[in-house]
Image (tube, helix red, strand yellow):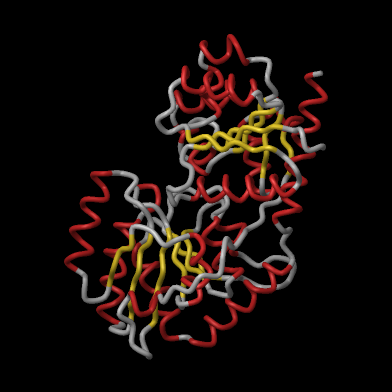
Amino acid sequence: MNSTLRAILLTPTALPRLTGNAVTAERWRFALSQEGVMVNVIETQNLSPAGLVDVLDRFHPHVVHAHHISRAGALMLDPLVAAKYGHLPLVVSPGGTDINLHVMKEKGMKIIGQTCRAARAIIAQSPEIAHLLQELLPDLKGRIAAVPKSFLWFGKDHYDLRTVAGCGRQDILFFMPAGIRPVKGNLECLRAMEKAQASCPEIRLVFSGPALDVRYAGRFQQEIQRMASFASWLPGIPLRAMHSAYQGADVVLNHSLSEGLSNALLEAMAAGIPVLASDIPGNRWLVGDKNGIGPCGCLFNPGDPGDFIGKVIRLVQDTALRASLAANGRLRAAAWPGPTDEARGLLNVYAAVIRKCC
């Protein structure tokens, strides 16, 4: 692929917003740019069809890649956009809510099906996602393309997470980097951690992420203020400081009801930090034993707060377990593809769909 290739990346949120979708889009933008591609990342959250047409008019892309089918890719099906740019090669990659929650609603499944049928390729970043897509859209099996996911540290700026959290030397710090919204279970996690902290006073807890659901975040803020003796919320940590922030944690939390393949868990494992994650598709594949290395964290039943609390307490009390899980994470991360490998996988998909359209 030569340097004249122009690609639009549509994503629900983009930098400077600190969300998983924004981080993924920026990692792709950076790595694709290193391969000589002109990339324009466009946030779709408040983008109108006319606004998208204007972007396409000015940028003249060879391919459009929508990261999140229902919240980004579906915009390409709007009559105003499709009338002028329906011929453009469209690639989609699902978000966790595309394949785990939206499909449970008839309207969501219809939108996802229509968008995927308009796309020339559907990117799956894990075998589990590929299998689920094949079950949901069996007639589109031939369009599913595997591009293994990578991670990227955007810098090595210093960030003292333990001081921010008010940790003493003996305290055990749990860290949950995730936007504040119901699907991430931040509030439910906080309430369960209060019960665990009653048994283990050395627990400290930091949430980091923007408020993405105003009502939910309001309730979350009220509760975290009540628990300020051991819990705190940072609306965002700069991307360049995330590696340092992870290294201040003892355990990284994921309390989600739905995930595709979590950036936060990939980053935690690469930083050598054990994880405690909900036992759901996406997390299960990532955290469990792979190739004989062993698990990188503990999984809990998201429908059983007692299971979560019990595993929090076990991780607090079992230093050897935390060390073993961290070592497994580092071994797994060492074998992952790098951002260049991921970018070249995307380029192979782009090249294939462009050829089909010529």
Q: Is residue 123 left or right of residue 178?
A: right
- In the displayed structure, 317 sits above or below 231; it is below
Q: Which residue is painted at 47% across and 17% down in the image?
A: 50
User: Which quadrant of the view contains residue 214?
Assistant: top left
Q: Residue at x 26, y 50 (%)?
A: 217
User: Relative to the observer, which residue lies in front, 185 or 58?
Assistant: 58
Q: Position of residue 240 (x, y in %)?
A: 51, 63
Residue at the farthest bottom position? 169
- Image spot of residue 8 (x, y percent): 62, 32
Q: Quadrant of residue 205?
A: bottom left
Q: Residue at 33%, 75% (x, y): give it.
A: 164
Residue 55 sits in which quadrant? top right
Q: Is residue 324 above or below residue 1?
A: below
- Which of the pair 275/28 is nearer the observer? 28
Image quadrant holding the N terminus, namely top right
* Viewer-closest of 56 and 292: 56
Residue 249, percent from left and from top: 45, 75
Give the side of residue 348 with respect to residue 83, left or right: right
Quadrant of the image containing the C terminus: top right
Q: Is residue 50 above or below residue 63?
A: above
- Left or right: residue 5 compared with residue 197: right
How many marks are shown on the rendered structure? 0
